[in-house]
Amino acid sequence: MAATQLAPQYQNLKRSFDARPCDLKTCGALLAQLKIGLIETGLLLPQGHHNLEDLVTAREILEIGAFWSIRSKDVPSFDRYFSQLQTFYKDYSLILPPSPREYPIQGLNLIRLLTQNRIADFHTTLESLPAEALHDNPFLKHPVNLERWLMEGSYSKVWSARNEAPAEEYKYFVDSLMGTIRNEIASCEEAAYNSLPIKDACTLLFFTNRSELMSFAQRRTWEIDLMAEQIHFARKGEEKLEIPKKKLIISSLTYARELEQIV
């Protein structure tokens, strides 16, 4: 397949991707066909000299694929597209014009690393990005702020950051972070309290309505008392540790006799 033959499918992909709502099913089918075309033309992981327009088209196809992956909630697919884009962002950076989608995708990757608790990889990635962009670009400042607030334990700021996300796709990862945060808070509540008013539990766990709290409570096997407006936490009984006294005495005596024989 010649690179020029990708143009009609690429235009169809852009129309489906820009549609409101986005036609995810059609985008997925077109992306699969286009990636085969990129492989056949040597543009999926390009090496050496290629036509500039073909390189730009290939980069845009992969960038749409990265956003489509997040909208489809397919993180492994996003990882693959992000990895394939590195050739364009790094090896051909002096040849290709800057892409307006590069920093949004770099920012999504940073938040992905946070959700996977890959803090070392997060900071390694930050070091590879321009310092001025980290301070000025909203797509990069957002994950940098999230990481700082997580380290500080400022979970309310993480929650507020969802409404300040620079792109809709960022909210998916912020929601994932909040799921982890809620489980940590819930574990602390179980250890600190026997029960809590439903209203207080809702506030502490950053839920905006009772139905979300009820679903969360059921998953954690909490007892819900609607009459008293209370949630009772499931406490595991303290495990009793049985010390095998007789066995220890016999073992100690045997050890003592062996020492006497050595001496």
Image: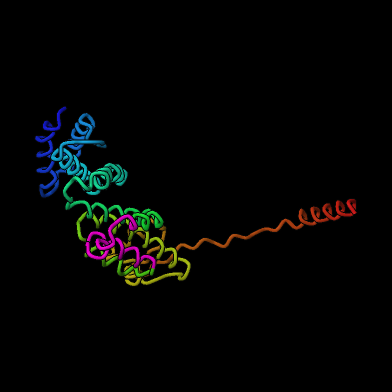
Q: Is residue 60 left or right of residue 123?
A: left
Task: Assign the magenta stretch its main secondary structure.
Answer: helix
Residue drawn at (41%, 58%) of the image: 220
Task: Indicate whether 234 appears above or below 261.
Answer: below
Residue drawn at (81%, 53%) of the image: 250
Q: Is residue 2 left or right of residue 222?
A: left
Across and down, in percent, residue 53 comes to: 13, 40
What is the count of numbered marks?
0
- Does the magenta-highlighted stretch encompass residue 141? yes
Quadrant for residue 186, please give it: bottom left
**Along the viewing direction, whichever of 133 and 145 lies nearer the viewer:** 133
Across and down, in percent, residue 47 comes to: 26, 36
Task: Indicate whether 115 appears above or below 56.
Answer: below
Quadrant for residue 125, please give it: bottom left
Q: Is residue 210 left or right of residue 5?
A: right
Asked whether the viewer can see residue 203, the reply is yes
Across and down, in percent, residue 61 comes to: 18, 41
- Does the magenta-highlighted stretch encompass residue 90? no
Extreme residue toward the top, this view: 1
Quadrant for residue 48, please give it: top left
* Quarter occupied by the C terminus: bottom right
Which color scheme does this rendered protein use? rainbow
* Quarter occupied by the N terminus: top left
Asked whether the viewer can see residue 25, the reply is no
Q: Which residues lie in the magenta part?
A: 126-151
Residue drawn at (32%, 55%) of the image: 128
Across and down, in percent, residue 45 comes to: 26, 37
